[in-house]
Amino acid sequence: MKTNCDRRPKMEDRRVRRVWLSALCLVLAVVAPLRAQESGIPVGSAAPGAKLESLDGKAAELSQYFGKLPVVMEFWATWCPNCKELEPAMLAAQKKFAGKVQFVGVAVSVNESPELVRRYVEKHGLAGMQFYDRKGTAIDAYDVPATSFVVVINKAGKVVYTGLGGSQDLEAAIRKAL
C-alpha cells in the first residue's frame, strides 16, 4: 500500500498488508521463487530511509547505514522457509565480505516480536545490524513483496540488486555493489 505524506495508513490497512504478506510468503514457499529484479523497489532507485527499532526497542534510522559501505539488506522472519533456505548463503556472505559490506536484517512484524527475533539472531549467529519493522515503514518504502527479499545498495546509495527467495546468488549480487 502506498501512502502520501499527508495520510498515515489506518491500523486496519497495515493489518491487511501484514496478513497479505504472510499469505504471500506461504505461497512463495510452495511455488518456484521469483528471480532477481521481478518485484519490489526498482533497481537504480535511491535507497530510501525508514524508521525502525533495534531489537532492544530503541529508535533507529535505516539511512544511517548508506553511503559508507555497500549494504546487503534482507527482509526476513523467523518462520519463513525461504529465509531459512537463504540463511547459509547469507552467513557465508557475511563471513566472506566482513568489513567490506554492511549487512542489515529487517525482521517483519507479522507473527513476530523483538524478543523472538533477538533469540533467533543469537541462536543462529546472524551478523550485521538487525532491526524490527514494527510499523511496516521499511516494508512500504522498499515495496517488499514477501520475506526473503534481499536488496543490495552500493556506496552511492543506489539499489543495484533485488531478489526474492531462498536460492539467490548473493555473491554475484554483492559484486554489483563493490
Image (tube, rainbow, N blue to C red):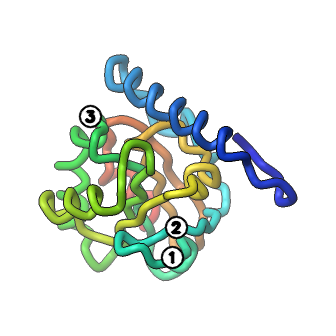
- Indicate whether 161 appears above or below 100: above
Residue 131 point in image, percent of width and height = 41, 65
Mark 1 neighbour class, 10 Å CA radius: few under 14, some 14 to 19, many 20 or more: some
Out of 21 and 155, give the one closest to the viewer.
21
| Residue type, label 2 | Leu
Q: Position of residue 145 (x, y in %)?
A: 53, 37
What's the mark number on residue 60? 1
Q: Residue at x 17, y 49 (%)?
A: 88
Give the CA separation, mark 2 to mark 3: 24 Å
Identity, as a three-letter code, of the amino acid under mark 1? Ala
Q: Residue furthest right?
A: 6
Quarter holding residue 86: top left
* x and y percentages locating residue 84 in the rendered image: 23, 42
Q: Is residue 48 above or below residue 54?
A: above
Residue 167 visible, this orientation: no
For mark 2, does the 10 Å Cα neighbourhood hold few (<14), some (14 to 19), or many (20 or more) residues? many
Instruction: Check disc 2 and report the residue beneath it.
Output: 52
Q: Is residue 5 above or below residue 88?
A: below
Q: Name the one closer to the observer, 165 or 17.
A: 17
Q: Position of residue 146 (x, y in %)?
A: 47, 37
Mark 2, mark 3: which one is toward the viewer?
2
Q: Residues within 10 Å of mark 3 (few under 14, many from 20)?
A: many
The residue depicted at 66 percent of the width and 62 percent of the height is 46
Is residue 156 visible to the viewer in this orientation of the structure? yes
Q: Nearer the viewer, residue 2 or 70?
A: 2
Q: CA distance from mark 2 to mark 1?
A: 5 Å
Task: Residue 81: give its label.
Answer: 3
Q: Is residue 82 left or right of residue 162?
A: left
Q: Secondary structure at mark 3?
A: helix
